[in-house]
Amino acid sequence: MDFTSRQLRAFLLVAQHRSFSRAAEALYITPSGLSVLIRELETQLGFRLFDRTTRHVGLTSYGSELLGEVRHSLNKIDTTVSRIGRSAVEARLSLSIGAPLPIAANILPEAIKEFRTIRPDLRIRVFDVVGEDLTRLVEEGKLDMSLGAFFKPSPRIRRAPLFRFSLMVIRPDNDPELRRASTTWSALKGQPLISLAPGNLLQPLIDKHLARAGVCGPRIAEFNYLHTLIAMVEAGEGIAVIPSFALPAFRNRKVAISKLINPVVNLDFSRVSLRGKKLPPGADDFTFFLQGYIARWAGRAGIL
């Protein structure tokens, strides 16, 4: 049997009001339209629901037996729809963002704090993830979007460019002569080099340009995270090539920074989201704000 919720609500209202005319008013239809709904329902059921006279409407024994179940079912539907509706509203006002640790720890907190003065209604949740997880979690629907430098294309992902960073070299800040605005790749020959672990998606790009400049030899150490690598450089363990978006992690770190040239190697920093899935309202607003925020921060940091 294929009942409609409108038929069941018509039945419930007639049972409550004991009147077709008052039930029709509550359902915002005409009494004749209500009669059609009840007649269709009775035909599908195969038994009468009401005893009707010109002055009285009463439930049959079958109608009385059915009434409790209909009331319970409709109440359950209404409660569930209301709960889902609240969740949907909350989801529309929530944005989940994945970002590598240097961005999640050093750029997004202050950016979100400033953005909240513009959009206090939007709840932004940040997840510090690394490598391929930035794309995978978006593909699985666990994140609305991710931020980062993405090297592997995916047909399920759409990419929106945000900003262009570059590769830089950092050294212990213990010699004023080493403080220079730029350094060539070939000038790194013979230097003790600390690098990211081979599994880091950024390291193959760095290795390619080191090899082209003839910079080879064993690495002093390899680390999974930029923060560890920066701390080791500060401690005098060696030098390292890093992306310029990690510069905020240098606060209170005694390291000298130089832009790598001949060639300049750019890193396109992007927002990725699931193709075909609409982003929550506010995602574009935050993305546009973040572009301006990064531009202001990068200008202060001397990247621009």
Image: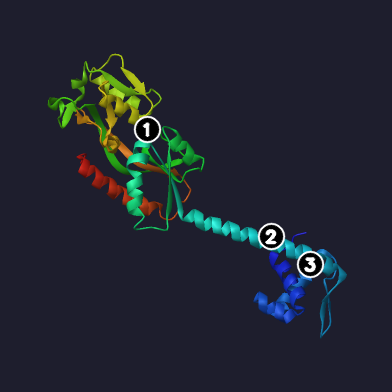
**What's the residue type where badge 3 is placed?**
Leu
Q: Position of residue 186 (x, y in %)?
A: 19, 21
Q: Position of residue 173 (x, y in %)?
A: 19, 27
Q: Is residue 144 visible?
A: yes
The 10 Å Cα crowd at callout 3, few under 14, some 14 to 19, many 20 or more, is some
Residue labelled with disc 3: 67
Q: How many marks?
A: 3
Q: Quadrant of residue 304?
A: top left
Taking 235 as reference, is 164 above or below it?
Answer: below
Q: Nearer the viewer, residue 144 or 175?
A: 175
Tell me if label 2 and label 1 are in contact, CB under 8 Å: no
Residue labelled with disc 1: 151
At a point 81% along the width and 67% down the height, the residue shown is: 43
Mark 2 and mark 1: span between their CA atoms?
49 Å
Q: Secondary structure at mark 1?
A: loop
N-terminal label among 2 and 3: 3
At a point 35% along the width and 46% down the height, the residue shown is: 109
Mark 3 and mark 1: span between their CA atoms?
62 Å
N-terminal label among 2 and 1: 2
The mark lying in front, picked from 2 and 1, is 2
**What's the residue type where badge 2 is placed?**
Lys
Taking 7 as reference, is 173 above or below it?
Answer: above
Taking 246 as reference, is 114 above or below it?
Answer: below
Q: Quadrant of residue 265?
A: top left
Q: Residue furthest top?
A: 217
Q: Quadrant of residue 131?
A: top left
Residue labelled with disc 2: 76
At a point 25% along the width and 18% down the height, the residue shown is: 192
